Image: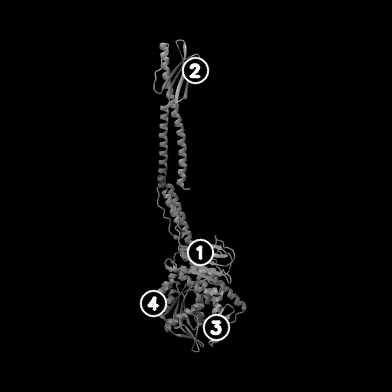
Amino acid sequence: MKLLTRYNYINLLSTIAIFVLSGVAFFFALHLTLLKQMDEDLRIEQREITNYVALHDMLFTPVEVKDQETIIEKTKRPYEKEKFKTVELDHHEDYRQLSFSIQAGGEWYNVIVRKSLEATEHITRTVFAITFCTILLVLFLTVVINSTILRKLWQPFYTSLDLLQRFKVNNREPLGLPASNIDEFTFMNSILERTTAKAIQDYERLKEFTENASHELQTPLAIIRSKLEMMMQGENLTEYQFNALQSASEALDRLARMNQSLLLLTKIENEQFDNKSFVDLAQIIQQKAAQFVEIWQDKSLNISLDVKAVQLHANKELIELLLNNLFSNATRHNYENGYILITLSQRRLCIKNTGHPAPLNRKHLFQRFYNPSNNSTSNGLGLAVIHQICTANGFKVDYDYKDDLHIFIVTFINESTQTYLP
Amino acid sequence: MKVLIIEDEKNLSDSICQYLADENFLCEVADTFDTALEKISLYDYMCIILDINLPGGSGLGLLKELKKNNKNDGVLIISARNSLDDKVFGLKAGADDYLSKPFHLPELSARVAAIIRRKSFNGNNIITFEELQLNLGEKTAIVNKQIIDLTRKEYDLLLYFISNKNKVISKNAIAEHICGDEMDLSGSYDFLYSHIKNLRKKLVQSGCPDYIRSVYGMGYKLSLS
């Protein structure tokens, strides 16, 4: 639920509650006041009758007045005390009546003075209607004002949120939050700026470290390799020495490759592959497949290639590396007489291969140095490279496991990122 | 044939020297920018192996100096900075080839040999190993005046072997030479076996002794015995 919706919700509910309560109270107060007024009027009528009786010691014949009735009856049983009462008469009209007894000429008379409540009720209804309309209007205005003013007030917050959402630690760009004259927002923005700047700095340092470490490793690696290759030339090596040499150079090859992958990852992060052009993906796939054909034949793999013409705007070198890694991956983790199915459509590239009969861990799959099989020929960077290349080109890579096939899907269409709008 | 190795790591330049010396190259070493500058201005070399990061300056600066003085020495850049920019810049500045560290010595040797051949014979020459002849211009192999029908990869392999004759070349070095180093083969070099088997078969069929032999499963070597 959005902040504004939530606020409006609470605001509206409490306003309605207050208005209903005060409306009810107002209605009763008005009603009672008007009744009291009516009772006063009835008292005046009573006083007139009493005065007349005191003066003449007799009663008069009542005059017909609109909305008013006076009934005088001679009685043997006078009322014990005078009484106000609201009655409904036969033609469904409410009347307020005052009944009292009076003695005139030695006789007791019961007198009832009545006045119609129609006018009073009319006033009450009108006032109530006006109040009700006012309440509705006030509520409506509250919602409108809230949503415009609050939106305006909270605008800096949403701007910050939006900028934060677009923030990427590898963009090296500080957030650049706009200044606000509201203390809270200024405070929040300064904290955000500080935190993100720190994140960028840490990230840069980490990247620099990786880059420097990888670069600095290249020369020692070159020395070791050259020394091993010189030793290989020795004439009278024992079998033990040969085996040791071979193990050492295989380990060195792995190390060199791992270092190369790390360097590549850093280079992609540094956006050193930013020259993009239109790349004929189908053609590159065919070329790569031709390069791999011997290795596939050697492993007796069954290859199915279903490629449609697709043009991509991307870095060609990276696309080649991507395919290298995808193909190597599908080949290395395959078994003799296994299958590799490659399909390319306008939207996606899909590579399915047989292999270890269990799905891989989707969560950690694309992390660096994740190597579930502990396969010594894999350095756990191949999938990280694939992921990084896809990210750099705005692609999406997914993994699935279905019908004993490991499936890697690269989707080319970049989905626009969701933004927070108030 | 004089080769200058400009490399500040003595351990590395020693190995390169030693390896190339067997190929009848005469190697000199310069380990700083200034000594290198002095050497290239005083002498002519068939090939200069040039490291980019040097104490006292950048190898690319030396390259510019060479070109400024209209020197025709061949230049092979070896760099730890495996970056495309260095490569592009180096080649644009007039280097003949680029090899990133850590390289294989046989690869380095083959490239140095190729640069020298290009510089001295305009790339159109024939190299021989016993009765084997490789026509580099036409990319053909000839034994007893008979052209052997080799595939492109088999020809490349043979040239690589002859460029590193009498040397054990590891499988990894051969695989990277054939497939390029960006292909992650990771120990699956079995496909090499069929290539080399076919090459040996074709050579023997054409009446040439089997010069290529496997060395303890570690690599291969082309030699007389």
Residue carrying label 4: B67
Q: Tell me the crowding category of disc 3: few under 14, some 14 to 19, or many 20 or more residues within 10 angstroms, Cα based.
A: many
Q: Distance between the residues labelled 2 and 4?
A: 132 Å
Foreground disc of the pair 1, 2 = 2
The percent position of residue A98, horizontal first and vertical second, equals: 45, 20
**Nearer-N-terminus badge (3/4):** 4
Q: Residue A81 carries which label?
A: 2
Disc assigned to residue A409: 1
**Disc 2 secondary structure class:** loop
In depth, the one of A340 and A294 nearer the eye is: A340
Q: Are marks 1 and 3 on the same chain?
A: no
Q: How far apart are marks 3 and 2 (CA)?
A: 139 Å
> Measured from the top left, where is residue B69 in percent x and y?
37, 78
Identity of the amino acid at label 1? Ile
Instruction: Look at label 2 and name its amino acid.
Output: Lys
Residue placed under numbered mark 3 in the picture: B200
Is B2 on the left or on the right of A336, as rendered?
A: left
Discs 3 and 4 carry the same chain letter: yes
The quadrant of the picture occupied by the C terminus of chain B is bottom right
Kindly report the distance in space between the C-alpha atoms of the residues bearing marks 3 and 4: 43 Å
- In the rendered view, tell whether residue B166 sits above or below residue A375: below
Is the residue marked by circle 2 packed among few (<14), some (14-19), or many (20+) residues within 10 Å? few
Q: Could you tell me if the residues under marks 1 and 2 are in contact, i.e. CB atoms within 8 Å? A: no
Report the Cα–Cα distance between label 1 and label 2.
Answer: 97 Å
> Which is nearer the eye, B47 or A16?
A16
